[in-house]
Amino acid sequence: AVNKSGKHTWDPAQDAPARIKRVSIEGNIAVGKSTFGRLLQSACPDWEVMTEPVSMWQNIGTGSSKDPHGPPQTVSNLLQMMYQDPQRWSYTFQTYACMSRVKTQLQPPPAHLLASEGSPVQVYERSVYSDRYIFALNMFELGCIGPTEWAIYQDWHSLLVEEFGHRLELEGIIYLRAPPETCLQRLRQRGRAEEEGVKLDYLETLHLQHERWLLEKSTEVHFDKLRQVPVLQLDASVEFQRDPLVQQRLISEVKNFFS
Ligand code: DGT
């Protein structure tokens, strides 16, 4: 929409203006999605990178904080609970992660994107689609989400995606691809406490899910439009975190792909 002063405005009941592209960054744990998102953010003024709310999953307030005589507010670390007891907590984790991804993808574009004369892009770290076709599916195949939980998850996930329609659609996916061994090395280097017990075979199963979804175009994907979303595959096995030349090459690949 355009208001009286000629500025683009955002009506939350409407879709994002068609010229704003929505793109997600996908890839294995610790491949470097956040680092790459920050690079994109600083190299492309017309891009807005929305970060993944990992800290929300680590700090869920429980207990009553409103009643001064009630139990004190405590904090649960759902990420840690999921890694410590995946059979008990994977389904719960998936409901919360998916809800936070829906919220992120529904956030209106910031004013500077709406006002931009260029080719603005809103970028998400992961999406409601990797929630289902990477993590939830993987946990189901590993036996950490039971058949009944999986049926219920798929039912409400499809309902959400269909009901929110255009507002959750993507115009592109950036797939940061690296061998699981490289991701494990990066994961150990960053030393996130909850991930201490993560083993190579878990990263291998997640790698295969990415390959099935993004490269082999798995027939498990239930949304026709999602199967047609263009995927840019980037070689993230190279050390891009500190090498400015590699960074420039990757950024220009992205810019060319989405221009
Ligand atoms: P990056 O920036 O590529 O280094 O990525 P990370 O590892 O910071 O971010 P990400 O999305 O791979 O995940 C953060 C942590 O949360 C990691 O331990 C994996 C876990 N995680 C993320 N999403 C899900 C999910 O939907 N289900 C499960 N079970 N775990 C998830």
Image (tube, rainbow, N blue to C red):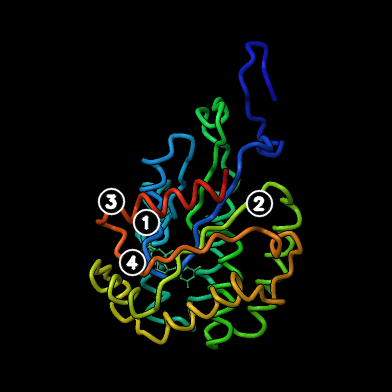
Pointer 1 local density, CA inside 10 Å: few below 14, some 14–19, many at least 20:
few
Distance CA(mark 4)–CA(mark 3): 12 Å
Q: Earlier in the sequence, mark 4 or mark 2?
A: 2
Quarter of the figure with the C terminus: top right
Report the side of 70 relative to 187 (left or right): right
The residue at which mark 1 appears reads as: 55
Pointer 2 local density, CA inside 10 Å: few below 14, some 14–19, many at least 20:
many
Q: In the image, which is nearer the foreground, mark 2 or mark 1? A: 2
The residue at which mark 3 appears reads as: 244
Tell me the kind of residue under disc 1: Ser
Above or below 184: residue 118: above
Percent across and percent down for residue 80 are: 36, 72
Tell me the kind of residue under disc 3: Pro
Q: Does the residue at mark 3 contact the one at mark 1 (Cβ under 8 Å)?
A: no
Distance CA(mark 3)–CA(mark 2): 33 Å
Residue found 39% across the figure and 74% down from its top = 81
Q: Secondary structure at mark 2?
A: helix
Q: Nearer the viewer, residue 75 or 242?
A: 242
Q: Secondary structure at mark 3?
A: helix
Tally of numbered discs: 4
Distance CA(mark 4)–CA(mark 2): 31 Å
Q: Earlier in the sequence, mark 4 or mark 1?
A: 1
The residue at which mark 4 appears reads as: 238
